[in-house]
Image: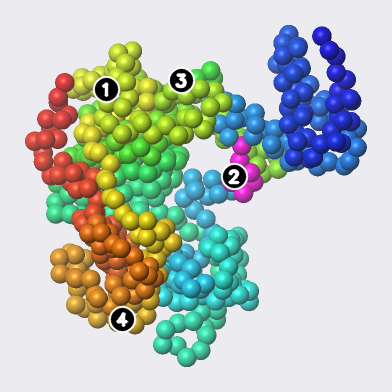
């Protein structure tokens, strides 16, 4: 067998670009592993350390080890399951902020319109609302730095910062003769996990965008605000999950004391999670809507509700991410997520769908799982039964809904898809409201219900939108989508963000329409929950 000196490999790398240096190092490691399979795990770790010592001490040029180590960690974790991953310092900071449900900023929702930041709304009791910033204000400068023409991500970075730090904004306001200077201090902003809540007749609707730690309290407050409703829809479509504790807390709201919510199975972590307290117990009939992008904590909640026969799951088969991740902080502020266990639903189902080690791209590109109610093979070895009514349910690949709803088929032209992706609808609304009296619209349509029934799209608004898209051949479906989207965005400016979802769901969301039909039919719900 040929023997290679480590120094020979190191010195020959001066003929390679830095881009190929790490690949050479990893190839050396792989070759040595094959040639020295008898090395212990500890010796393998020592070998990797030795490689980096040789690079640092003997390589012809000075080399920063940081990018090499980062790339090596990424490459290593990529060879494991699809959800183990390396996180940069910036990614770790964003992750922690998302899971805590808080960040320090000013509390505005905005859009970059004609290279200028236009305020869409301010959050209640935020620094922006306390300082008197209003919808449609144009912010031109942040701390005496012009933000005209810079991208939205850069603006977001400038607006966020340490809590209690000072910020000076220059604001152009409609009707004001001079530019305003507004000074404020950043504060912690609660990022709402409830993205929408409203009622349609006697059915309440709550959409959840993420599982952050304050979620249960947010859902309960939204539920109380709905008033006297007869059934409730929890919409988890496109919800990628979040904190385990949030899933446990939300499930506890609908289950009884002592009910199992989830369990884990792993090398070092085997736990069972129960509802331990009777603080909140909502007995209202429940429908949960999921789709192919509902993952992780969304699936834990859906699985618990389904296994206890507590509510009807409608939609499409969920993503199938049931791996327990431990997030490990590294000394430089970066971190990594590694899988330490698998989640199980109360009946014992494994949520995680099958994968091959190191085949993350193949795993993520699998779209067949949600295209039909029988997309996942119902193998008898994955057969389980719900805990109350003993209905058949299957594991091994996400949560299969009790009532399957096919994907909405909206065949839009390329011009309208392009307009939607470029936020053209939002830009047209801003231009329209620059010339239209919003107070008169509110006076004419005092409630969202009246607006939904009575408001017809203004020809001036349609004309403004058409100027953006130019000459385009539009189908009836395109026109229906344009009308609904413009009406929903206008309603958002009049009544708040919930109004946008309200208008769109009534006009265009076929999945939600069918979910409402299920939630309105007590007999259908009971029949679904007792069928075998």
Q: Answer yes or no: do the residues labelled 2 and 3 have beta carbons within 8 Å?
A: no
Which structural element holds mark 2?
Answer: helix
Q: What is the distance, in whole Å, between disc 4 and disc 1 at their CAs?
A: 54 Å
Question: Does residue 248 appear in the picture of this structure?
Answer: no
Q: Earlier in the sequence, mark 2 or mark 1?
A: 2
Q: Earlier in the sequence, mark 4 or mark 1?
A: 1
Q: Residue at x 59, y 30 (%)?
A: 78
**Can you say whether 133 is above or below 201 in the image?**
below
Q: Residue at x 51, y 79 (%)?
A: 171
Q: Residues within 10 Å of mark 3 (few under 14, many from 20)?
A: some
Q: What is the distance, in whole Å, between disc 3 and disc 4 at their CAs?
A: 60 Å
Question: Does residue 35 appear in the picture of this structure?
Answer: yes
The residue that label 4 is drawn on is 436
Which structural element holds mark 1?
Answer: strand
Camera-nearest label, 3 or 4: 4
The residue that label 1 is drawn on is 393
**Is 407 within the magenta?**
no
Q: Earlier in the sequence, mark 3 or mark 4?
A: 3
- Judge from the rendering whether residue 150 lies leftward or rightward of residue 37; answer left or right: left
Q: Earlier in the sequence, mark 4 or mark 2?
A: 2
The residue that label 2 is drawn on is 92
Which structural element holds mark 3?
Answer: strand
Q: Position of residue 464 (x, y in %)?
A: 34, 75
**Is 91 within the magenta?**
yes
The residue that label 3 is drawn on is 265
- Judge from the rendering whether residue 152 lies leftward or rightward of residue 7; answer left or right: left
- Judge from the rendering whether residue 227 lies leftward or rightward of residue 307; answer left or right: left
Q: Earlier in the sequence, mark 2 or mark 3?
A: 2
Q: What is the distance, in whole Å, between disc 4 and disc 2 at their CAs?
A: 44 Å
């Amino acid at each position: 067998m040929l023997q290679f000196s480590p120094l020979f490999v190191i010195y020959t790398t001066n003929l390679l670009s830095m881009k190929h240096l790490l690949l050479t190092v990893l190839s050396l490691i792989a070759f040595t592993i094959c040639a020295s399979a008898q090395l212990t795990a500890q010796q393998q770790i020592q070998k990797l350390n030795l490689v980096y010592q040789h690079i640092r001490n003997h390589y012809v040029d000075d080399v920063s080890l940081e990018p090499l180590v980062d790339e090596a960690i990424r490459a290593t974790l990529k060879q494991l399951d699809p959800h183990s991953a390396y996180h940069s310092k910036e990614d770790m900071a964003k992750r922690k902020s998302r899971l805590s449900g808080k960040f320090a900023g000013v509390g505005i929702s905005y859009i970059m319109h004609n290279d200028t930041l236009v305020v869409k709304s301010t959050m209640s009791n935020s620094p922006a609302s306390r300082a008197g910033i209003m919808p449609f204000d144009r912010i031109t400068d942040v701390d005496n730095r012009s933000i005209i023409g810079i991208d939205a991500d850069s603006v977001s970075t400038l607006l966020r910062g340490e809590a209690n730090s000072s910020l000076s904004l220059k604001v152009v306001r409609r009707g004001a003769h001079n530019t305003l200077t507004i000074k404020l201090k950043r504060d912690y902003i609660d990022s709402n996990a409830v993205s929408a809540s409203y009622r349609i007749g006697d059915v309440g609707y709550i959409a959840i965008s993420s599982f952050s730690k304050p979620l249960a309290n947010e859902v309960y407050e939204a539920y109380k605000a709905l008033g006297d409703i007869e059934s409730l829809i929890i919409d988890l479509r496109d919800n990628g999950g979040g904190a385990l504790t949030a899933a446990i807390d939300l499930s506890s709201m609908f289950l009884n004391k002592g009910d199992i919510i989830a369990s884990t199975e792993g090398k070092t972590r085997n736990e069972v999670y129960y509802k331990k307290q009777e603080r909140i117990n909502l007995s209202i009939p429940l429908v949960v809507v999921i789709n192919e992008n509902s993952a992780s904590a969304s699936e834990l909640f859906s699985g618990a509700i389904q296994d206890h026969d507590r509510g009807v799951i409608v939609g499409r088969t969920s993503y199938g991410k049931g791996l327990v991740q431990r997030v490990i902080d590294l000394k430089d502020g970066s971190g990594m997520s590694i899988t330490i266990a698998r989640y199980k639903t109360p009946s014992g189902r494994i949520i995680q769908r099958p994968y091959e080690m190191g085949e993350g791209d193949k795993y993520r590109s699998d779209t067949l799982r949600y295209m039909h109610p029988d997309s996942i093979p119902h193998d008898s070895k994955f057969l389980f039964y719900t805990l109350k009514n003993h209905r058949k349910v299957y594991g091994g690949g996400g949560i299969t809904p009790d009532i399957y709803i096919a994907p909405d088929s909206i065949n839009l032209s390329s011009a309208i898809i392009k307009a939607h992706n470029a936020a053209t609808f939002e830009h047209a609304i801003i231009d329209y409201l620059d010339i239209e009296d919003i107070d008169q619209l509110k006076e004419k349509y005092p409630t969202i219900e009246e607006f939904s029934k009575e408001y017809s799209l203004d020809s001036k608004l349609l004309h403004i939108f058409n100027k953006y898209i130019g000459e385009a051949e539009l189908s009836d479906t395109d026109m229906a989508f344009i009308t609904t989207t413009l009406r929903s965005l206008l309603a958002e400016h009049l009544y708040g963000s919930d109004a946008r979802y309200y208008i769109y769901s009534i006009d265009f969301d076929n999945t939600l329409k069918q979910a409402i039909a299920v939630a309105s039919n007590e007999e259908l719900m009971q029949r679904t929950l007792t069928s075998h």
